[in-house]
Structures are given as structure tokens and as C-alpha cells.
Image (cartoon, rainbow, N blue to C red):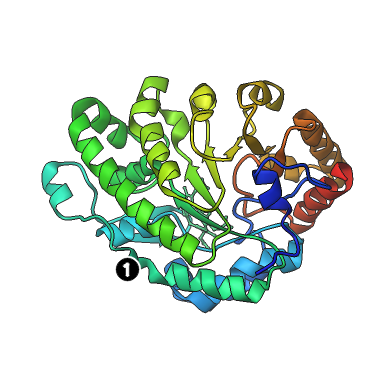
Amino acid sequence: MILKNDLLLRAARGEKTERTPVWLMRQAGRVLPEYRAVREHLSGFKELVETPELAAEVSIQPVDILDVDAAIIFSDILVVPDAMGLPYELVEKVGPRFSKTIRSEEDLEGIKVADPDDISYVYEALKITKRALNGRVPLIGFSGAPWTLFSYMVEGGGSKTFSEPKRMLYQNPQLAHRLLDMITESTIAYLKRQVESGADLIQIFDSWAGILAPEYYREFSLKYIKRICSAIENVPITVFAKGAWFALEDMADLDCQTIGLDWNMDASIVKSILRAKTLQGNLDPCALYGSFDDIRKETKSMLDSFGDHPHIANLGHGVYPDTDPEKVKCFIESVKEFSS
Ligand code: CP3
């Protein structure tokens, strides 16, 4: 299918574009009242993720309502641990939780490399979304990075320090590598199926990259991201490793087109380290708490900081659920206005 708006894909390939493409991480979610309306009638988040027609509906909402340059499939990174035998639940106002965790060799016996067929609801959602978009904008597929998924599987939920996964790296690195290897194999098969089902670009979220020391990040995260990037063919890949400014030089060697930046990273420095990569980001999500006037100024200065380096505008992390959707629209309109 021919895309009517392929700005995102051209920017990802490093081509010059008429203007900078823009989308937001977590654009399909609670920031939109229309999302909350769909979610309200369901038993929970998991039902939404596992019902392809509804997942497709909320994936398309931001395209209709916010006029972004890409749709991202509505799902979660935790569907992969789920298919490996570690079911998650999402506890309201607390976050994700696993009833089992992986802390020992015996725990590892209870899980397997995921059968990609067990996540068919995501491929179905991609196919329905792709058909309904009818070429309006590209469709982004995604997964968690092995290190971030490992962190949730070992910790059993969210945490400020993720001491348990880090403890394993120091006390039993062989076990850590065995689990990371299984997650990586599961993720590669899963992402290949996403591409076959219509994903035009893949983003890998390493949300907990920033909690590791540089040597440990290379050994327990980047190595596995590298394997995934080399295995995925035919579509551009974006690697978003939050807080991993210390690893930017290593990221230049990844077989991916775009590197996502959080708001702690300074575009003027990153541009010179990652000359051959498109950069994505990186306005502080809290900037959208400012006035309309301030958002316009902040957005302009963010665009200026990337200059004519290939760029995809986004926030430096997911949009916060309590952001006024009108402020989100102001950000998107400002990118379009100031970059054309
Ligand atoms: O619009 C999009 O970006 C697509 C949907 C998407 C979700 N999760 C939906 C979601 C994406 C890309 C994710 C990725 C994800 N999930 C990450 C990586 C990105 C990041 O933010 O760092 C992580 C770490 C998770 C794990 C996860 N899932 C957490 C920590 C939470 C709870 C936090 C919260 O916002 O409540 C979730 C639940 C979740 N995933 C929600 C949404 C819309 C909120 C659930 C709800 O509707 O109540």
C-alpha cells in the first residue's frame, strides 16, 4: 500500500523532508478522553490489549484527534513475558505486577522461549489497524528491550532501584544471561511477525537503560539489542534507551536507523556523536504543563537544537496521562509550523 504521509519513514532513513515528522510515545492512552471511554467498559487493560478490534480503535484515535504523523500499535511490552509463562496484571494506580518472578535456576525451569503464535492478538490488531489507516500514516510496532523486560520479570513489578535484577547481575551473571537470551529469542520471533503483519517501523524501548553502569549496560543490554537489530529486516528500527547517554558512542554501531533521546540528552552534543543516525525526541514531557505560549517557545528551541540533522520530533519519554490534550495538540502544531 502506498503511504500518503511517509515523513516518518523518510526521516528515519535520513532523507531530507519538507518538515519534521511528529508523534508521541504513549499517544494511545489515558491522555485522550476517547481512550478512557473505551477502556471504561472493559474488565481491564489486558482485555483491551487482547481484543484486536479495540486495540486497533485506540491506536487510530491519536491519528484522528491529534493529527500525528504515525500510529503506534496499542499493546504493552509485557506481552512477551506473558507468552514466556510469566503472566502480568496491571494494578490500578500501582502499575504492572507479576505473581511469579525469576530469581533462581528453578524459577527459570518454569518459563520458555515464547511461541510467537501465543501473541497473535497483536498481529491481528496490526492488520486491522493497517487496513483502517488505509495509508494515511505509517504504523509503528514495538517491543521492550531484553534488559527492561528482564528487570520486570526479576523484580516482579515496577521499582525505583530495580535492586533484584541488578543483584542477579552481580551474584549470578550466568543465570542473567540465560534469561536475557530467552527474552531475546522470544522478541526476535515476535518482532518478525509484527513486520509480516504490517508494522512499517519497529521501536525498541529500553526504559531502564539508565540504571546500569556503562560496562554492565554493554554486557547485559546493548549486546542483546544488537542481536535484535541484526535479526530484523526490511523496516527501519528506532532504539530508545532512556538515560543511556553514557552509551551513545556504542549505539553508533547498532544496525538501526534512529536513536531516541530523552530530555536529559543535549541534541547539540548527540548530533556530533551519532552523525549517521536519525535522532528522535526530546522535549521534557513536563514542558506540556506550561502555557500555550511557553510550549511554542520550548518546541521551537527543541527543533533548533537539532538543526538540519535528520530528526523525528517527540517527547523525551511517554506523554503523562494528566496532560491537557489541547497542550499536546499545541506541541504537534508547533512542530509542523516551525519546521516547514
Ligand atoms: O501509545 C503508545 O505508546 C502505545 C502503547 C504503549 C503502552 N505501553 C500502553 C500502556 C506502549 C508503547 C507501552 C510500552 C511500555 N509499557 C513501556 C516502555 C515505554 C515507557 O513508558 O518507558 C513500559 C516500561 C511499559 C510497562 C508498563 N505498562 C507500565 C510501567 C505501565 C503502568 C504505567 C501507567 O502508565 O499506568 C503500563 C500500563 C500501560 N501501558 C498503560 C498504557 C496506556 C496504562 C494502562 C491503563 O489504561 O490504565
Quarter of the image for residue 73 reads bottom right
Residue sitting at 69 percent across and 51 percent down? Answer: 8
* Residue 109 percent across, percent down from the top left: 13, 51
Task: Name the foreground residue: 19 vs 196.
Answer: 196
Quarter of the image for residue 290 reads top right
Residue sitting at 64 percent across and 25 percent down? Answer: 270
* Residue 43 percent across, percent down from the top left: 44, 75
Instruction: Look at the numbered disc 1 and say if its residue's Cβ is closer than 8 Å to ligand 1.
Output: no
Task: Name the foreground residue: 58 vs 115.
Answer: 115
Instruction: State left or right for residue 162 relative to residue 113.
Output: right
Residue 214 appears in the rendering: yes
Disc 1 element: helix
Quarter of the image for residue 35 reads bottom right
* Residue 86 percent across, percent down from the top left: 27, 57
* Residue 318 percent across, percent down from the top left: 60, 48
Q: Amino acid at mark 1?
A: Asp
Instruction: State left or right for residue 316 relative to residue 329.
Output: left
Residue sitting at 69 percent across and 68 percent down? Answer: 135
Residue 23 appears in the rendering: no
Q: Which quadrant is the C terminus positioned in? A: top right
Task: Name the foreground residue: 81 vs 319.
Answer: 81
Q: Which residue is mark 1?
A: 118
For residue 224, above or below residue 167: below
Residue sitting at 32 percent across and 54 percent down? Answer: 186
Instruction: State left or right for residue 164 relative to residue 201.
Output: left
For residue 160, above or below residue 53: above
